[in-house]
Image (cartoon, helix red, strand yellow):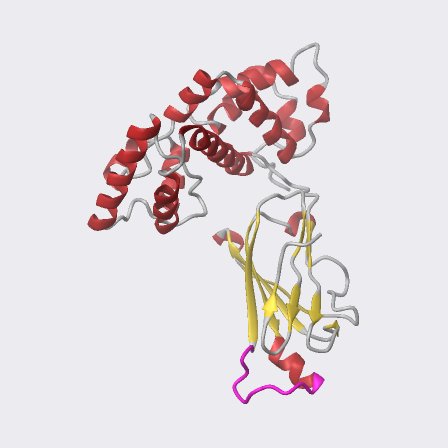
């Protein structure tokens, strides 16, 4: 017998009683249940049909973000002030919300060296004195080095630019929390790939390609191995779709030296490019991610296509 997920789907979430919805969505914005409350008033009231237009987690995130964006500046400042200091050490993490504690631990902020901690504290103090609210960065998929670089860069912003940057980070944190809170059992997104041989000016047919999922840890591992078709694409369509299409970190490995050896291109005894790895992230379960490779024996490039 299938076990029903404890997480609600979008449709089930929007059909819940008002208070139950607020209980579940209230923590999405740090200590600010008013966002969920305002969303209910705008979208789930007895005279509103707007909730019926929300079908994806992305649409829900946009609707909740719109509530924040439309709020008075004082309310936004209150939201910013609800966020914790990013320099909290392990012994201070107990004072954080469960969501913030998990996010900061994943970033390695509970393992700062004494020198790193001193630098964080100095920059954080300068930042807070200048802007009047704590430095905020969506840290779930960042490292402590990312955080330190970000605060060094943003402390030089003017007040209005940084206020907008901080709100943007708050929205990003909310997005990641929504992905954790909602069951996306039937994602609409999919992953495709296309390899182009820039040395010979043609699609890279018959190239071996491997796809691995690196995170989340519970589903990490080999996704599949493929051989490109005559058009340089994967046979059989998307490499990931349906329930296999999960938010996380992935890595393509393209076996380019084997391909160019077979094509007869001149390559060195120790190939300059042997296996080309491309590590990328999937952040939205309902979008199309196209990750192509343009490659020669001596160079390669990629981008997020469509």
Residue drawn at the location 41% of the way across and 26% of the way down: 80
Give, as a single range, the part of the protein colored magenta: 263-273
Which x, y percent locates residue 133? 35, 27
Q: Looking at the picture, how far across and down is residue 195, in whole percent?
A: 69, 67
- Most foreground residue, 28 or 77: 77
Residue 89 appears anywhere in the view: no
Depth check, front residue: 7 or 90: 90
Q: Position of residue 172 (x, y in %)?
A: 51, 36
Q: Does the segment drawn in magenta span residue 268?
A: yes
Please tell me whether the stretch drawn in magenta is mainly helix, strand or loop: loop
Work out whether 299 lies above or below 67.
Answer: below
Q: Quadrant of the N terminus?
A: top right
Camera-nearest residue between 64 and 238: 64
Place residue 211 in its image quadrant: bottom right
Q: Is residue 151 left or right of residue 183?
A: left
Q: Considering only vertical position in the picture, is 188 above or below 260?
A: above
């Amino acid at each position: 017998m299938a076990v029903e997920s404890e997480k609600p789907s979008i449709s089930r979430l929007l059909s819940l009683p008002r208070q139950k919805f607020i209980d579940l969505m209230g923590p999405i914005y740090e200590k600010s249940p008013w966002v969920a409350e305002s969303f209910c008033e705008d979208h789930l009231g007895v005279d509103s049909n707007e909730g019926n237009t929300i079908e994806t987690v992305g649409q829900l995130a946009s609707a909740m973000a719109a509530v924040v964006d439309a709020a008075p500046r004082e309310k936004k400042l209150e939201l910013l002030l609800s966020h914790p200091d990013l320099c909290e050490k392990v012994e201070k993490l107990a004072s954080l919300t469960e969501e913030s504690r998990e996010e900061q631990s994943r970033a390695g902020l509970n393992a700062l060296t004494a020198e790193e901690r001193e630098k964080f504290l100095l920059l954080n103090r300068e930042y807070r004195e200048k802007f009047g609210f704590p430095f905020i960065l969506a840290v779930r998929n960042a490292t402590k080095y990312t955080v330190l670089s970000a605060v060094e860069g943003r402390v030089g912003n003017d007040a209005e630019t940084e206020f907008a940057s901080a709100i943007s980070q708050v929205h990003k944190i909310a997005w990641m929390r929504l992905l954790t809170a909602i069951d996306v059992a039937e994602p609409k997104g999919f992953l495709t790939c296309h390899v182009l041989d820039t040395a010979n000016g043609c699609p890279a047919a018959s190239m071996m390609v491997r796809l691995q999922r690196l995170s989340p840890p519970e589903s990490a591992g080999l996704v599949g191995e493929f051989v490109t078709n005559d058009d340089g694409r994967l046979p059989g369509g998307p490499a990931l779709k349906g329930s296999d299409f999960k938010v996380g970190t992935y890595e393509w490995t393209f076996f380019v030296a084997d391909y160019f050896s077979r094509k007869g291109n001149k390559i060195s005894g120790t190939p300059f490019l042997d296996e080309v790895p491309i590590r990328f992230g999937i952040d939205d379960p309902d979008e199309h991610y196209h990750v192509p490779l343009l490659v020669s024996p001596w160079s390669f490039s990629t981008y997020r296509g469509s």
